[in-house]
Image (tube, rainbow, N blue to C red):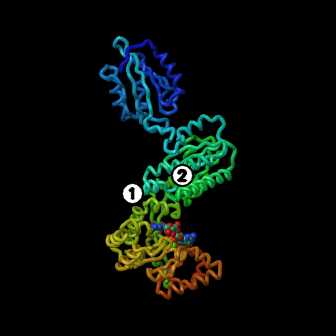
Amino acid sequence: MASEFTGLSVAQICEAIDTLTPCMDDFVYVYDLVNDFYYISKLAVERFCLPSNRFHNVIENHAKFVYPADIPMLQQDLEELVAGKKEFHDLLYRWISVDNDPIWINCRGFVVRHEGTPLYMLGCINEIGARQKADNVSGLLGVTSLQNYFLEEETPPIGYLLRLGLDDFKEINEKLGSDYGDLILKRTAECITACLLPNQKLFRAVADEYLIINFSDRSTEEAIDQYKHIRQTIDTFIKENNYEVIYTISGGILKSEQFIGCSFSDAMKFSEFSLNEAKRHGKNCCYIFCQADYEKFLRRRKLSQLLRRAVTHDFEGFEAYLQPLIDTDTNTIYGAESLMRFHTQEFGMVSPGEFIPLLEETGLIIPVGKWMLNEAMHFCHKIQKKIPDFKISINISYVQIVKSNIIAEILNAVDYYQIPPATVIIELTESGIVELDTRITKLWQRLKERGIRLALDDFGTGYSNFHYLNELKPDIIKIDRTFTLKAVANDYEFKMLSLMSNMVHSMDLRICVEGVENTTELSRMKELLPDYYQGYYFGKPCPYQEFSEKFVN
Ligand code: C2E
Ligand code: CA
Ligand code: CA
């Protein structure tokens, strides 16, 4: 394939490359071997970390845009070509994009010689992973085309961007096969097309997502109406299709002022977020992008990363605090509840109300809960040297019960720290127990058999149900601060609480009143004759050292 010189100079080739550039997506290049000079289509500079579209010292410059691990392979291939050991250059390797990502390219080319002397290399580079511009399943243009549209439009788009996504499309594919799935994607595209308004364009985003871009001045209300219209059209299609398949569609709306001035990739991120929010809100609905929600989402994501990092770095940033529990009979310290804390440089002290749900969602509650269990037992072991019957109360999440071997972990820790089981209290929040789950009853029984005590936390906030109080027979019922507050403010609430505590006492269970902050609250709650108190009035949660100094020594 190596060619004999045809009389075309490098300068003429460069000119031809410039002429061809607007007509192609691939990047044509010439590598002048005599002058060690490289020339490539100007568009390549927008995509890759090239020093320029024309540069000298080609081999040294490779370090700037060729993925480091691929440089030796590339240079060996070039040497073989120049030496005439090889005729054609056809190599798959990676270049570095302007965003610093490795991008797979296919580089092809051949060397042109004059009387045996290599003059230049001529060829073409194409991105093998480049996204398709059109989608033959839905018959729509793809996102790359949308991007070009964004770049080409001289006046920025006004109106909105509406991203539509099929709900649970995976299920259609799984149940009815991917050919049927393709058909649904096509029909859905037709339904959406039928709802397009003047001055709008429809694109296929990814698998089961579509994007409508609106170039006229239309309001968010109009975007919502359009979404509803699409939903109706799909419903009609489903009906006409004799309910062979039933599915819904969600929508994410981005107003133009929310993406004008943003990069294309940011606009896509916001629109993906909007669609995800619609799905998170139960699907078959639409959501309008809100910056504050997006920031919350970013914070949650960042926090999840920090939590994961902490777990893999010896739980750095996590700390077990202790808060005193007071025995109302003796007015002395009965024990402590262990409460988790998390702090990072970036966020400072994060509230457990914020990070515990994240630990649960990510499953990280399993390692962190185990760590916490050991910390608490360790503190308890040290305190019991001075106060032998000191109780330690430990919170357990529902996720730990369902997804880890928490029973064994608790029993191991009790053995390891030689703690009398009767001084250990395991707290489970009532809202976690939606139904009487056999896993919970099993845990409850196994721990009871070993003499460990159980507390039902936040009683009254979930599905409070005396029926399962009787089933579970916890040793202690913890009354949430929200009840304390209501009972102090309102007589009716107080009477209700009073009845509830009589009932609990009649079942021979103990009551702990949580969140007592001042004497007013204390004197009111005293009337309920609780067995234990917990609250800032008696002491705030604090680190072990401080707790020892204040309450143990
Ligand atoms: P919780 O188990 O109901 O813990 C009692 C909460 O009430 C603690 O909040 C405590 O600081 C707070 N508190 C105590 N006395 C007062 C008071 O007088 N006034 C007010 N305003 N608040 C008071 P905290 O530490 O922020 O923990 C919040 C929740 O996070 C806990 O509620 C619990 O559900 C969860 N949590 C904390 N640590 C752990 C843990 O190690 N594992 C699990 N699974 N959950 C935990
Ligand atoms: Ca608790
Ligand atoms: Ca509680």
Residue 275 visible from this viewpoint: yes
Name the residue beneath numbered marker 1: 314
- The part of the image, by quadrant, that contains residue 281 is bottom right
Q: Nearer the viewer, residue 39 or 496?
A: 39
Name the residue beneath numbered marker 2: 165
Image quarter hosting the C terminus: bottom left
Instruction: Identify which amino acid the numbered label 1 is placed on.
Output: Asp
Q: Which residue: 49% across, 79% down?
A: 477
Question: Vertically, is 317 above or below 183?
Answer: below
In terms of sequence position, does the residue under pointer 1 or pointer 2 come before the other? 2
- The mark lying in front, picked from 1 and 2, is 2
Q: Nearer the viewer, residue 515 or 328?
A: 515
Characterize the local packing of mark 1: few (<14), some (14-19) or many (20 or more) Cα atoms within 10 angstroms.
Answer: few
Instruction: Identify which amino acid the numbered label 2 is placed on.
Output: Gly
Callout 1 secondary element = loop
Callout 2 secondary element = strand
Q: Position of residue 499 (x, y in %)?
A: 57, 85
| Mark carried by residue 49 | none
Q: Which residue: 50% across, 20% down?
A: 16
